[in-house]
Image (spheres, grey):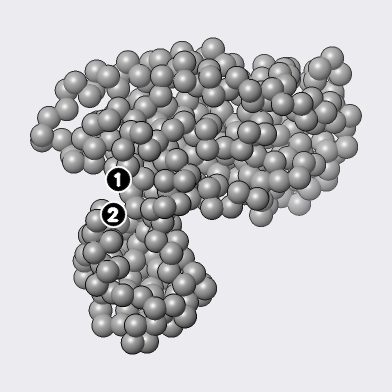
Amino acid sequence: MLFLGGVKFTAHCATFAPFVMNNLAPLLQAYRQHPAVRTVLDAISTPGARLQVKGLKGAQESLVISSAFQQQKNPVYLYVAGAKEEAAYHQNDMAALLGGESVYFFPDSFKRPAYFDDLHAAQMLQRSEVINNITGEQDKGCIIVTYPEALFEKVVRPEILAQARIEVKKGEKLDVDFMMQVLIEYGFVRSDFVYEPGQFSIRGGLIDLFSFGNELPYRIELFDDEVETIRIFDPATQLSQRNLSAVNIVPNLNTRFRQDQKVSLLQILPPQTVVWMKDQQILLDRLQYCFERAEQFAGKLTALDSSELREIFRDRAFLYPGDVVQDLADRSIIHLA
């Protein structure tokens, strides 16, 4: 049974296991039509609303969140799971339910949550992609799925990120020497071939560039000093994926910005963002644990550690639990008990 603000809701599914993909659409429609979901939508229409949803099991959380998401105009939802594995589970469910809708997984930067000795390059890229997407498309709704250790790390302010973006458009002039100078200043490294974020190469009229905020690199082809084509390509096969009319190139968001240029993820989300979470006290306790571990680790850093780690910890670009309490104060919050 599910209770939403006093309304009893009989749920029909606790897991996706008995259902194939073509059963998901009618299942989601059934959730959308239930009056209990309307109760949720009515409650979160009031800024700063607080609502408790009881009795959800397994994939039911994803079903309720997805059905509510579909009935609002361009909503932004932040789902804070209790742990990384739980977050990944629900992100996969919601992505399957919503198909082409934007459902982002926002991880921490390290190989193990709250263990700061090893950075995870793919997760750092994923964080950059999410920030790049949600700040570049303010008029689109999305669901961001995360967990306490990922929220612990600050992100770059949108206005600072906008100033730092390099925009390249088809048909415009491009000074290759100036471009190369800016890329090096932004932490890019010149190489013969690009295969990971932060690399670029220049061969005649071809500029290959792997931005820190993208999953695949760009190939910019020049005719004299004019941008003739822009393509996304696969570095393994060198085959083009698709053509673009313009690209935005972002620097390394973890190391190229000062502490005063970074804020909580919550602060870059729209004021009407709805936060879904299990228990706020558990979130704060986990953030406090992360903070204590980070302070201990920062005191042990030496010149032998990677420069990227030293940059991240130099300004202590992490949150105090009290900062999160303040950021949550005016948000609509749904507790999933």
Residue 264 place in picture, x, y as percent: 46, 31
Label 2–label 1 contact, CB within 8 A:
yes
Residue 109 place in picture, x, y as percent: 36, 37
Residue 111 place in picture, x, y as percent: 33, 35
Judged from the image, the secondary structure of the residue bearing numbered disc 2 is: loop
The three-letter code of the residue at mark 1 reads Arg
Whole-angstrom CA distance, mark 2 to mark 1, is 7 Å
* Residue 15 as seen in the image, left or right of residue 164: right
The residue closer to the viewer here, 209 or 107, is 209
Q: Residue at x 83, y 38 (%)?
A: 32
Question: Circle 1 sits on which residue?
Answer: 256
| Quadrant of the rendering where the C terminus is positioned | top right
The residue closer to the viewer here, 91 or 284, is 284
Q: Residue at x 50, y 21 (%)?
A: 324
Q: Is residue 146 visible?
A: no
* Residue 120 as seen in the image, left or right of residue 320: left
| Quadrant of the rendering where the N terminus is positioned | top right
Question: Circle 2 sits on which residue?
Answer: 186
Q: Residue at x 39, y 82 (%)?
A: 226
Q: Please tell me how crowded label 1 is: few (under 14), some (14-19), or many (20+) other residues with Cα within 10 Å.
A: some
Q: Residue at x 53, y 48 (%)?
A: 135
